[in-house]
Protein backbone atom coordinates (compact mmCIF):
# COMPACT_ATOMS: atom_id res chain seq x y z
CA UNK A 1 0.00 0.00 0.00
CA UNK A 2 1.24 3.49 -0.79
CA UNK A 3 0.74 6.59 1.32
CA UNK A 4 -2.53 8.38 0.54
CA UNK A 5 -0.58 11.46 -0.51
CA UNK A 6 1.12 9.48 -3.29
CA UNK A 7 -2.08 8.19 -4.77
CA UNK A 8 -3.84 9.94 -7.67
CA UNK A 9 -6.61 12.26 -6.53
CA UNK A 10 -9.96 10.62 -5.86
CA UNK A 11 -12.02 13.75 -6.40
CA UNK A 12 -10.25 14.50 -9.70
CA UNK A 13 -11.05 10.98 -10.91
CA UNK A 14 -14.75 11.45 -10.06
CA UNK A 15 -15.02 15.05 -11.26
CA UNK A 16 -17.13 14.10 -14.30
CA UNK A 17 -19.65 12.30 -12.07
CA UNK A 18 -19.96 13.80 -8.59
CA UNK A 19 -18.06 15.53 -5.80
CA UNK A 20 -16.24 13.29 -3.33
CA UNK A 21 -16.64 14.45 0.25
CA UNK A 22 -15.48 13.60 3.76
CA UNK A 23 -16.84 14.36 7.20
CA UNK A 24 -14.21 16.02 9.34
CA UNK A 25 -13.69 17.17 12.90
CA UNK A 26 -11.80 20.26 13.92
CA UNK A 27 -9.02 17.97 15.25
CA UNK A 28 -8.55 16.67 11.75
CA UNK A 29 -8.23 20.02 10.07
CA UNK A 30 -5.54 20.94 12.63
CA UNK A 31 -3.30 18.01 11.60
CA UNK A 32 -1.26 19.28 8.63
CA UNK A 33 -0.84 15.87 6.96
CA UNK A 34 -4.51 14.96 7.32
CA UNK A 35 -5.45 18.37 5.97
CA UNK A 36 -3.21 17.69 2.97
CA UNK A 37 -4.87 14.30 2.38
CA UNK A 38 -8.26 15.97 2.63
CA UNK A 39 -7.37 18.66 0.12
CA UNK A 40 -5.83 16.19 -2.33
CA UNK A 41 -8.69 13.71 -2.45
CA UNK A 42 -11.89 15.50 -1.45
CA UNK A 43 -13.89 18.28 -3.05
CA UNK A 44 -16.55 18.66 -0.35
CA UNK A 45 -16.53 18.58 3.43
CA UNK A 46 -19.13 18.01 6.13
CA UNK A 47 -18.69 18.83 9.79
CA UNK A 48 -18.99 15.66 11.85
CA UNK A 49 -20.34 17.59 14.85
CA UNK A 50 -19.52 21.28 14.69
CA UNK A 51 -22.69 22.32 12.84
CA UNK A 52 -25.19 20.31 14.84
CA UNK A 53 -27.66 22.27 16.99
CA UNK A 54 -25.82 21.46 20.25
CA UNK A 55 -22.63 22.99 18.82
CA UNK A 56 -24.38 26.18 17.75
CA UNK A 57 -27.06 26.94 20.35
CA UNK A 58 -25.94 28.90 23.41
CA UNK A 59 -27.86 28.46 26.67
CA UNK A 60 -25.98 31.29 28.35
CA UNK A 61 -26.72 33.72 25.53
CA UNK A 62 -30.34 32.58 25.36
CA UNK A 63 -30.95 33.13 29.07
CA UNK A 64 -29.20 36.51 28.93
CA UNK A 65 -31.36 37.66 25.99
CA UNK A 66 -34.59 36.51 27.68
CA UNK A 67 -36.65 36.18 24.49
CA UNK A 68 -38.97 33.13 24.76
CA UNK A 69 -39.06 32.61 20.99
CA UNK A 70 -35.46 33.21 20.04
CA UNK A 71 -32.49 31.10 21.09
CA UNK A 72 -29.03 32.65 20.94
CA UNK A 73 -26.42 31.17 18.61
CA UNK A 74 -22.65 30.97 18.83
CA UNK A 75 -20.85 30.41 15.54
CA UNK A 76 -17.32 29.86 16.87
CA UNK A 77 -17.13 26.21 15.80
CA UNK A 78 -19.09 26.72 12.59
CA UNK A 79 -16.82 29.57 11.52
CA UNK A 80 -13.65 27.61 12.26
CA UNK A 81 -14.58 24.93 9.75
CA UNK A 82 -16.06 27.32 7.21
CA UNK A 83 -12.81 29.33 7.30
CA UNK A 84 -10.82 26.14 6.72
CA UNK A 85 -13.04 25.24 3.75
CA UNK A 86 -12.81 28.73 2.26
CA UNK A 87 -9.04 28.96 2.73
CA UNK A 88 -8.55 25.57 1.03
CA UNK A 89 -11.11 26.11 -1.72
CA UNK A 90 -13.37 23.19 -0.71
CA UNK A 91 -17.17 23.34 -0.92
CA UNK A 92 -19.23 22.58 2.20
CA UNK A 93 -22.43 20.75 2.96
CA UNK A 94 -24.13 22.00 6.13
CA UNK A 95 -25.09 19.16 8.50
CA UNK A 96 -27.59 19.56 10.13
CA UNK A 97 -30.32 22.08 10.96
CA UNK A 98 -32.97 19.84 12.55
CA UNK A 99 -32.40 16.50 14.26
CA UNK A 100 -33.86 14.63 17.24
CA UNK A 101 -30.32 13.96 18.49
CA UNK A 102 -27.59 16.36 19.58
CA UNK A 103 -30.09 19.15 20.20
CA UNK A 104 -30.11 20.50 23.76
CA UNK A 105 -33.02 19.61 26.03
CA UNK A 106 -33.55 23.28 26.96
CA UNK A 107 -34.39 24.24 23.38
CA UNK A 108 -37.71 22.40 23.81
CA UNK A 109 -38.59 23.75 27.28
CA UNK A 110 -41.00 26.56 28.02
CA UNK A 111 -38.57 28.78 29.93
CA UNK A 112 -35.38 27.31 28.43
CA UNK A 113 -34.90 25.07 31.50
CA UNK A 114 -32.00 22.67 31.14
CA UNK A 115 -34.10 19.98 32.76
CA UNK A 116 -35.73 16.92 31.17
CA UNK A 117 -38.74 17.23 33.48
CA UNK A 118 -39.50 20.91 32.94
CA UNK A 119 -42.70 21.72 30.98
CA UNK A 120 -42.34 21.78 27.21
CA UNK A 121 -42.73 24.94 25.15
CA UNK A 122 -46.09 25.19 23.37
CA UNK A 123 -46.05 23.98 19.78
CA UNK A 124 -46.46 27.42 18.19
CA UNK A 125 -43.60 28.83 20.26
CA UNK A 126 -41.38 25.91 19.32
CA UNK A 127 -42.12 26.36 15.63
CA UNK A 128 -41.21 30.05 15.89
CA UNK A 129 -37.97 29.13 17.67
CA UNK A 130 -37.29 26.75 14.82
CA UNK A 131 -37.72 29.42 12.17
CA UNK A 132 -35.62 31.92 14.12
CA UNK A 133 -32.85 29.36 14.50
CA UNK A 134 -32.82 28.45 10.82
CA UNK A 135 -32.90 32.11 9.81
CA UNK A 136 -29.98 32.97 12.12
CA UNK A 137 -27.82 30.09 10.90
CA UNK A 138 -28.50 30.48 7.19
CA UNK A 139 -28.20 34.24 7.23
CA UNK A 140 -24.91 34.11 9.11
CA UNK A 141 -23.37 31.42 6.93
CA UNK A 142 -24.48 33.02 3.69
CA UNK A 143 -23.37 36.50 4.74
CA UNK A 144 -20.01 35.63 6.29
CA UNK A 145 -19.10 32.89 3.77
CA UNK A 146 -21.02 33.61 0.58
CA UNK A 147 -21.00 30.82 -1.99
CA UNK A 148 -19.30 28.25 0.27
CA UNK A 149 -22.18 26.01 1.35
CA UNK A 150 -23.85 24.30 -1.62
CA UNK A 151 -26.39 22.18 0.26
CA UNK A 152 -28.19 22.07 3.61
CA UNK A 153 -29.33 19.03 5.57
CA UNK A 154 -32.57 20.63 6.68
CA UNK A 155 -34.00 17.63 8.53
CA UNK A 156 -32.13 14.49 9.55
CA UNK A 157 -33.81 11.14 10.30
CA UNK A 158 -37.54 11.89 10.60
CA UNK A 159 -38.70 8.44 9.44
CA UNK A 160 -38.15 5.25 11.47
CA UNK A 161 -40.31 2.21 10.63
CA UNK A 162 -39.27 0.40 13.81
CA UNK A 163 -41.11 2.96 15.94
CA UNK A 164 -44.38 2.26 14.11
CA UNK A 165 -45.58 5.87 14.15
CA UNK A 166 -48.13 7.40 11.78
CA UNK A 167 -46.77 7.09 8.22
CA UNK A 168 -43.70 5.58 9.91
CA UNK A 169 -42.56 8.92 11.32
CA UNK A 170 -40.04 8.65 14.13
CA UNK A 171 -42.10 9.07 17.28
CA UNK A 172 -39.24 9.04 19.78
CA UNK A 173 -38.18 12.54 18.84
CA UNK A 174 -38.92 15.72 20.77
CA UNK A 175 -39.83 17.35 17.48
CA UNK A 176 -42.48 14.75 16.73
CA UNK A 177 -43.68 14.57 20.32
CA UNK A 178 -44.28 18.33 20.48
CA UNK A 179 -45.32 19.24 16.93
CA UNK A 180 -46.40 15.98 15.29
CA UNK A 181 -45.36 16.03 11.63
CA UNK A 182 -45.48 19.82 11.41
CA UNK A 183 -41.83 20.52 12.28
CA UNK A 184 -40.80 19.00 8.99
CA UNK A 185 -42.56 21.32 6.50
CA UNK A 186 -41.96 24.21 8.92
CA UNK A 187 -38.20 23.59 8.80
CA UNK A 188 -38.15 23.29 5.03
CA UNK A 189 -40.30 26.42 4.58
CA UNK A 190 -37.86 28.41 6.70
CA UNK A 191 -34.88 26.94 4.89
CA UNK A 192 -36.39 27.78 1.49
CA UNK A 193 -36.98 31.31 2.65
CA UNK A 194 -33.43 31.96 3.85
CA UNK A 195 -31.35 29.83 1.45
CA UNK A 196 -29.15 31.61 -1.08
CA UNK A 197 -29.87 31.08 -4.79
CA UNK A 198 -28.43 27.77 -6.01
CA UNK A 199 -28.23 26.09 -2.60
CA UNK A 200 -30.11 22.80 -2.41
CA UNK A 201 -32.29 21.65 0.49
CA UNK A 202 -31.71 18.06 1.49
CA UNK A 203 -33.64 15.49 3.53
CA UNK A 204 -31.14 13.05 5.05
CA UNK A 205 -31.72 9.58 6.52
CA UNK A 206 -30.05 6.22 7.17
CA UNK A 207 -31.13 2.81 5.81
CA UNK A 208 -32.67 4.76 2.95
CA UNK A 209 -32.09 1.69 0.76
CA UNK A 210 -34.53 -0.44 2.81
CA UNK A 211 -37.76 -0.86 0.80
CA UNK A 212 -40.17 -0.23 3.72
CA UNK A 213 -38.29 2.83 4.91
CA UNK A 214 -37.70 3.99 1.32
CA UNK A 215 -41.42 3.99 0.54
CA UNK A 216 -42.24 5.88 3.74
CA UNK A 217 -39.54 8.45 2.92
CA UNK A 218 -40.91 8.80 -0.61
CA UNK A 219 -44.44 9.45 0.71
CA UNK A 220 -43.05 12.11 3.04
CA UNK A 221 -40.90 13.68 0.29
CA UNK A 222 -43.98 13.99 -1.93
CA UNK A 223 -45.70 16.11 0.72
CA UNK A 224 -42.67 18.44 0.73
CA UNK A 225 -42.53 18.49 -3.05
CA UNK A 226 -46.17 19.61 -3.19
CA UNK A 227 -44.85 22.93 -1.82
CA UNK A 228 -41.54 22.81 -3.71
CA UNK A 229 -39.63 22.55 -0.45
CA UNK A 230 -37.04 19.85 -1.11
CA UNK A 231 -34.35 19.43 -3.80
CA UNK A 232 -32.19 16.50 -2.74
CA UNK A 233 -32.52 13.11 -1.11
CA UNK A 234 -29.56 12.34 1.12
CA UNK A 235 -28.95 8.62 1.56
CA UNK A 236 -26.60 8.37 4.53
CA UNK A 237 -24.91 5.13 3.49
CA UNK A 238 -23.77 3.56 6.76
CA UNK A 239 -23.41 -0.05 5.59
CA UNK A 240 -22.10 -3.30 7.03
CA UNK A 241 -20.00 -5.57 4.85
CA UNK A 242 -22.15 -8.64 5.65
CA UNK A 243 -25.40 -7.09 4.48
CA UNK A 244 -24.54 -4.36 1.99
CA UNK A 245 -26.85 -4.94 -0.97
CA UNK A 246 -25.80 -2.80 -3.93
CA UNK A 247 -28.93 -3.72 -5.93
CA UNK A 248 -31.20 -2.36 -3.19
CA UNK A 249 -29.11 0.83 -3.04
CA UNK A 250 -29.53 1.21 -6.78
CA UNK A 251 -33.29 0.58 -6.68
CA UNK A 252 -33.73 3.15 -3.93
CA UNK A 253 -31.52 5.73 -5.65
CA UNK A 254 -33.56 5.34 -8.82
CA UNK A 255 -36.82 5.65 -6.89
CA UNK A 256 -35.74 8.93 -5.25
CA UNK A 257 -34.41 10.28 -8.54
CA UNK A 258 -37.72 9.35 -10.22
CA UNK A 259 -39.38 11.92 -7.95
CA UNK A 260 -37.31 14.56 -9.75
CA UNK A 261 -34.90 15.00 -6.85
CA UNK A 262 -31.13 15.21 -6.94
CA UNK A 263 -29.21 12.65 -4.91
CA UNK A 264 -26.43 12.71 -2.37
CA UNK A 265 -24.79 9.96 -0.42
CA UNK A 266 -23.93 11.81 2.74
CA UNK A 267 -22.31 9.46 5.26
CA UNK A 268 -20.71 6.55 3.44
CA UNK A 269 -18.82 3.87 5.36
CA UNK A 270 -18.84 0.06 5.31
CA UNK A 271 -18.35 -1.54 8.70
CA UNK A 272 -15.83 -4.38 8.40
CA UNK A 273 -14.48 -5.84 11.63
CA UNK A 274 -11.19 -7.24 10.39
CA UNK A 275 -8.44 -6.21 8.01
CA UNK A 276 -7.27 -9.74 7.25
CA UNK A 277 -6.91 -10.81 3.63
CA UNK A 278 -10.45 -12.12 3.18
CA UNK A 279 -12.11 -9.06 4.72
CA UNK A 280 -9.85 -6.71 2.79
CA UNK A 281 -10.86 -8.44 -0.44
CA UNK A 282 -14.55 -8.25 0.50
CA UNK A 283 -14.31 -4.54 1.34
CA UNK A 284 -12.50 -3.86 -1.92
CA UNK A 285 -15.19 -5.62 -3.94
CA UNK A 286 -18.00 -3.91 -2.00
CA UNK A 287 -16.59 -0.45 -2.67
CA UNK A 288 -15.80 -1.30 -6.31
CA UNK A 289 -19.29 -2.50 -7.11
CA UNK A 290 -20.99 0.29 -5.16
CA UNK A 291 -19.01 3.04 -6.93
CA UNK A 292 -19.48 1.37 -10.32
CA UNK A 293 -23.24 1.48 -9.66
CA UNK A 294 -23.14 5.17 -8.70
CA UNK A 295 -21.08 6.05 -11.76
CA UNK A 296 -23.58 4.20 -13.96
CA UNK A 297 -26.43 6.28 -12.50
CA UNK A 298 -24.48 9.50 -13.05
CA UNK A 299 -23.78 8.51 -16.67
CA UNK A 300 -27.49 7.95 -17.17
CA UNK A 301 -28.06 11.58 -16.20
CA UNK A 302 -29.16 11.20 -12.58
CA UNK A 303 -27.80 14.24 -10.78
CA UNK A 304 -25.62 13.18 -7.86
CA UNK A 305 -24.34 16.23 -6.03
CA UNK A 306 -21.81 14.41 -3.87
CA UNK A 307 -20.73 11.12 -2.34
CA UNK A 308 -19.39 11.85 1.15
CA UNK A 309 -17.47 9.44 3.37
CA UNK A 310 -18.14 9.59 7.11
CA UNK A 311 -14.53 10.17 8.09
CA UNK A 312 -11.18 10.37 6.38
CA UNK A 313 -9.11 7.47 7.73
CA UNK A 314 -10.03 4.42 9.81
CA UNK A 315 -8.43 6.15 12.80
CA UNK A 316 -11.22 8.72 12.99
CA UNK A 317 -14.22 6.51 12.24
CA UNK A 318 -17.12 6.49 14.72
CA UNK A 319 -17.69 2.77 14.09
CA UNK A 320 -15.39 1.06 16.64
CA UNK A 321 -17.17 3.02 19.37
CA UNK A 322 -20.63 2.45 17.98
CA UNK A 323 -20.20 -1.25 17.13
CA UNK A 324 -17.98 -2.03 20.13
CA UNK A 325 -15.54 -3.94 17.97
CA UNK A 326 -12.71 -3.07 15.61
CA UNK A 327 -13.71 -1.50 12.33
CA UNK A 328 -11.88 -0.81 9.08
CA UNK A 329 -14.65 0.94 7.14
CA UNK A 330 -12.98 3.64 5.01
CA UNK A 331 -10.62 3.81 2.04
CA UNK A 332 -7.59 5.06 3.97
CA UNK A 333 -5.91 3.10 6.78
CA UNK A 334 -5.24 4.50 10.24
CA UNK A 335 -1.62 4.99 9.19
CA UNK A 336 -2.78 6.97 6.16
CA UNK A 337 -2.19 4.44 3.38
CA UNK A 338 -4.46 4.00 0.38
CA UNK A 339 -6.16 0.61 0.77
CA UNK A 340 -6.83 -1.78 -2.11
CA UNK A 341 -10.41 -0.49 -1.83
CA UNK A 342 -9.08 3.01 -2.58
CA UNK A 343 -7.37 1.73 -5.72
CA UNK A 344 -10.54 -0.13 -6.75
CA UNK A 345 -12.67 3.01 -6.34
CA UNK A 346 -10.13 4.98 -8.42
CA UNK A 347 -10.17 2.29 -11.10
CA UNK A 348 -13.99 2.27 -11.16
CA UNK A 349 -13.92 5.91 -12.29
CA UNK A 350 -12.00 5.10 -15.48
C1 LIG B 1 -25.87 9.91 11.97
C2 LIG B 1 -25.75 11.41 11.86
C3 LIG B 1 -24.32 11.86 11.77
C4 LIG B 1 -23.42 11.08 12.70
C5 LIG B 1 -23.55 9.62 12.40
C6 LIG B 1 -22.64 8.75 13.22
O1 LIG B 1 -25.95 9.23 10.82
O2 LIG B 1 -26.47 11.95 10.80
O3 LIG B 1 -24.26 13.21 12.07
O4 LIG B 1 -23.74 11.37 14.02
O5 LIG B 1 -24.86 9.26 12.69
O6 LIG B 1 -21.53 9.36 13.71
Image (cartoon, rainbow, N blue to C red):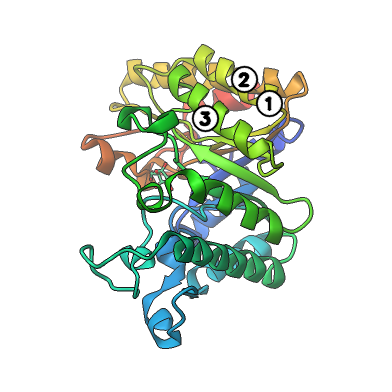
Q: Which residue is mark 3?
A: 217
Residue at the farthest top position: 247
Contact, mark 2 vs mark 1 (Cβ under 8 Å):
yes
Q: Which mark is residue 67?
A: none
Q: Note whether residue 42 is visible.
A: no
Q: Position of residue 336 (x, y in %)?
A: 45, 43
Ligand 1: give its quadrant: top left
In the image, residue 280 above or below residue 183? above
Tell me the crowding category of disc 1: few under 14, some 14 to 19, or many 20 or more residues within 10 angstroms, Cα based.
some
- Mark 3: C-beta under 8 Å from nearest atom of ligand 1: no
- Secondary structure, mark 1, is loop
Q: Position of residue 93 (x, y in %)?
A: 60, 51
Tell me the crowding category of disc 2: few under 14, some 14 to 19, or many 20 or more residues within 10 angstroms, Cα based.
some
Q: Which residue is mark 1?
A: 259
| Residue in front for this viewpoint, 210 or 123 | 123
Q: Which residue is mark 2?
A: 255
- Mark 2: C-beta under 8 Å from nearest atom of ligand 1: no
- Secondary structure, mark 2, is helix
C-alpha span from label 1 to label 3: 11 Å
Amino acid sequence: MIHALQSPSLCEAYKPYFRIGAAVSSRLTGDPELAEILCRHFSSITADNQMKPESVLSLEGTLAAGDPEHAAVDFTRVDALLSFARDHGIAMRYHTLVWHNQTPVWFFKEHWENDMNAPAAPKEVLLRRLENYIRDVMTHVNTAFPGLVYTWDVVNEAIEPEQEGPDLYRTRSPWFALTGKDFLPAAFRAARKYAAPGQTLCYNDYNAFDPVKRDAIIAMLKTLQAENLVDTMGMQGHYVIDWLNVDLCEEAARAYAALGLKLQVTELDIHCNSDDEAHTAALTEAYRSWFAMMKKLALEGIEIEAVTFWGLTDADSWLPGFRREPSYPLLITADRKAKPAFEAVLAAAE
